[in-house]
C-alpha cells in the first residue's frame, strides 16, 4: 500500500499504513527459496526471540493475529466459561470479543480523564465494593460469578497505570493480561510495556506500529504459561507422530513468511516509534488551542504515539469531531474517531459497566490524525494548515 496522488497531484495522507522499507523482501525471498513458508521455520523462532529480547520478557509465542493472541491468553490465564474479566470499555472490539470466545463475561471499566486509560480508581471501587471473597475466590456480589482476571488496554499506545492496576490484581489474586496491541515500543518508568504482567498480547495488523500484514504475539515470563500458550495455539498436539490431542486446541500459529516480514519490521521499530512521536509533537506545536486538546504522555510514560489524537471541543472549535473529519477528507487527509465504547456497542452493551463518562466524551470528541511514519514534514504541514483552516485558527507554518 502506498499514499497515492490524483490528477491534482495531492497525495492522500493516510492515518496509519505499513512502511516496508527494510529487509522485508530479502527475508521473504529467503522463505520462498528455502520452501519454509508454513507455520514452522527459522523466522518464527527468530521473530519470537527478538521480540522477547526487545521487550525484556522470557517467552514469546507468535500467533496469526492479535485477536487469537488475546483468546489464547485468556485460556492460558485460566479464564473459564462463566468467569468475569475486568476490561477497558474504550477499546477495539477484539479485546472484549476474546473474553466472550472463552465463554467469560466482560465487566467494562471506564477510562481516567487525563490519559484516557483504564481508571485504577474504578477498578479499586468495583473490586472492593461490588465483590466479595468466598472460599478463596472473588465473586461479583450482583452476578455471583467468579472474577478471574483484569485486561487493561494501552489505548493509542500510551501506558496504562500498570503499578496501580497490578497492585489491585495482586491484592485480589487476579491474573493480569495486557492488551498491548498498540504499544510495542512504549515504556513506563523505563520498563518496556509487556514485560511485567502475567501475559501481554501484541498485534501486527497492517495499521500497527510494525506489521506482518496480520499477526500477533503472546508475551510472558512464565515457562508454564508459555508452554500452555504454545500448546493451545498449535492444536493442543500431545503426540505429533500419532496425532494425539487431549484437548480442543486452535490453529493459531504464525507462518514463517509472516514472521519474516515481522522480523524485518522489528529491525525498524525504534525509528518508527520515534517518527510517530515526532508527528505527535508536530501537531501539538502547530495546532494548539482553539478547541483542540492533544493527548500527551503521563509522567514516567513514553507512548508509541500510535495515532496522534486530539479532543475537539465543538463550542471552542466551532465544529464537531465528525464535521472536522468530513472536511479534512475533502482535502485528502484521513482522520478517524475513536472506537464506539464497548458499553454502547450492540455486541456488548448487556455487560456490566463501571462508568464515569470519560469514554462517552472521548467517543464524541476524539479525532486521530495521520500518523504514518513516512509522512514528510511537508505532509504534516498540509494537515496543520488544512485543520487550522477549518478551525479558523492561526497556525505556525513549518520553516
Ligand atoms: C487494542 C486492540 N486490541 C486488539 C486488536 C486486534 O488485533 P488483530 O487485528 O491483530 O487481531 C487491535 C487491532 O487490530 C487493537 O487495536
Image (cartoon, rainbow, N blue to C red):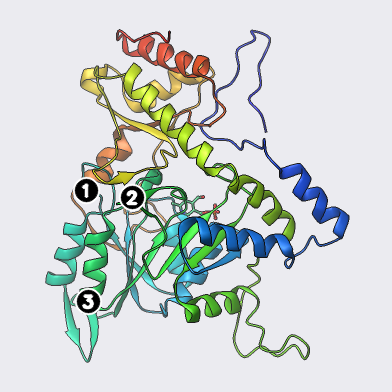
**Residue 36 falls left or right of residue 351:** right
Residue neighbourhood size for the residue with mark 1, other residues' Cα within 10 Å, grouped as few (<14), some (14–19), many (≥20): many
Residue 365: quadrant of the picture? top left
Q: Nearer the viewer, residue 296 or 53?
A: 53
Q: Is mark 1 within 8 Å of ligand 1?
A: no
Q: Which label's residue is closer to the chain start, 1 or 3?
A: 1
Residue labelled with disc 3: 172
Q: Nearer the viewer, residue 175 or 367?
A: 175
Would you say the residues marked 1 and 3 are in contact, meaning their CB atoms lie under 8 Å apart? no
Residue labelled with disc 2: 159
**Residue 210 falls left or right of residue 148:** right
Front position among marks 2 and 3: 2
Cα separation between marks 2 and 3: 22 Å
How far across and down, in percent of the image, does residue 284 sit?
33, 24
Residue at the extreme left of the image, as rendered: 129
Q: Please give the name of the residue rendered at 77% of the width and 63% of the height, measured from the top-left corner.
A: 38
Q: Please give the name of the residue rendered at 57% of the width and 28% of the height, measured from the top-left corner.
A: 374
Q: Is mark 3 within 8 Å of ligand 1?
A: no
Give the label on residue 322, or none.
none
Front position among marks 2 and 1: 2
Residue neighbourhood size for the residue with mark 2, other residues' Cα within 10 Å, grouped as few (<14), some (14–19), many (≥20): many
Would you say the residues marked 2 and 1 are in contact, meaning their CB atoms lie under 8 Å apart? no
Residue 307: quadrant of the picture? top left
Residue labelled with disc 1: 112
Amino acid at each position: 500500500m502506498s499514499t497515492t496522488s490524483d490528477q491534482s497531484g495531492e497525495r492522500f495522507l493516510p492515518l496509519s499504513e505499513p512502511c516496508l522499507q527494510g529487509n522485508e523482501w530479502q527475508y521473504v525471498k529467503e522463505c520462498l527459496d528455502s520452501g519454509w513458508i508454513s507455520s514452522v521455520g527459522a523466522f518464527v523462532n527468530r521473530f519470537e526471540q527478538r521480540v522477547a529480547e526487545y521487550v525484556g520478557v522470557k517467552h514469546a509465542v507468535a500467533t496469526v493475529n492479535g485477536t487469537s493472541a488475546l483468546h489464547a491468553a485468556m485460556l492460558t490465564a485460566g479464564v473459564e466459561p462463566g468467569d468475569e474479566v475486568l476490561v477497558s470499555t474504550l477499546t477495539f472490539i477484539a479485546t472484549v470479543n476474546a473474553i466472550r470466545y472463552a465463554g467469560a463475561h466482560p465487566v467494562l471499566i471506564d477510562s481516567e480523564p487525563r490519559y484516557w486509560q483504564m481508571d485504577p480508581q474504578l477498578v479499586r471501587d468495583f473490586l472492593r465494593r461490588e465483590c466479595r471473597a468466598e472460599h478463596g475466590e472473588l465473586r461479583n456480589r450482583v452476578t455471583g460469578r467468579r472474577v478471574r482476571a483484569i485486561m487493561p488496554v494501552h489505548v493509542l499506545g500510551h501506558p496504562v497505570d500498570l503499578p496501580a492496576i497490578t497492585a489491585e490484581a495482586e491484592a485480589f489474586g487476579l491474573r493480569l493480561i495486557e492488551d498491548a496491541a498498540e504499544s510495542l515500543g512504549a515504556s513506563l518508568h523505563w520498563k518496556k510495556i509487556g514485560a511485567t504482567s502475567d501475559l501481554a498480547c501484541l498485534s501486527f495488523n497492517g495499521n500497527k506500529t510494525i506489521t506482518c500484514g496480520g499477526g500477533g504475539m503472546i508475551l510472558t515470563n512464565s515457562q508454564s504459561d508459555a508452554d500452555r500458550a504454545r500448546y493451545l495455539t498449535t492444536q493442543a498436539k500431545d503426540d505429533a507422530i500419532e496425532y494425539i490431542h487431549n484437548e480442543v486446541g486452535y490453529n493459531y500459529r504464525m507462518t514463517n513468511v509472516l514472521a519474516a516480514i515481522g522480523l524485518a519490521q522489528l529491525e525498524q521499530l525504534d525509528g518508527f516509534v520515534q517518527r510517530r512521536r515526532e508527528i505527535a509533537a508536530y501537531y501539538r506545536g502547530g495546532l494548539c488551542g482553539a478547541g483542540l486538546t492533544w493527548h500527551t504522555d503521563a509522567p514516567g510514560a513514553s507512548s508509541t504515539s500510535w495515532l496522534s489524537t486530539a479532543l475537539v471541543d465543538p463550542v471552542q472549535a466551532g465544529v464537531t469531531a465528525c464535521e472536522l473529519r468530513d472536511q479534512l477528507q475533502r482535502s485528502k487527509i484521513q482522520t478517524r474517531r475513536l472506537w464506539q465504547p464497548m458499553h454502547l456497542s450492540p455486541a456488548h452493551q448487556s455487560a456490566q459497566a463501571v462508568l464515569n463518562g470519560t469514554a462517552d466524551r472521548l467517543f464524541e470528541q476524539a479525532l486521530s490524525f495521520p500518523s504514518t511514519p513516512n509522512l514528510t514534514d511537508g505532509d504534516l504541514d498540509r494537515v496543520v494548515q488544512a485543520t487550522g483552516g477549518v478551525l479558523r485558527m492561526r497556525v505556525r507554518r513549518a520553516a
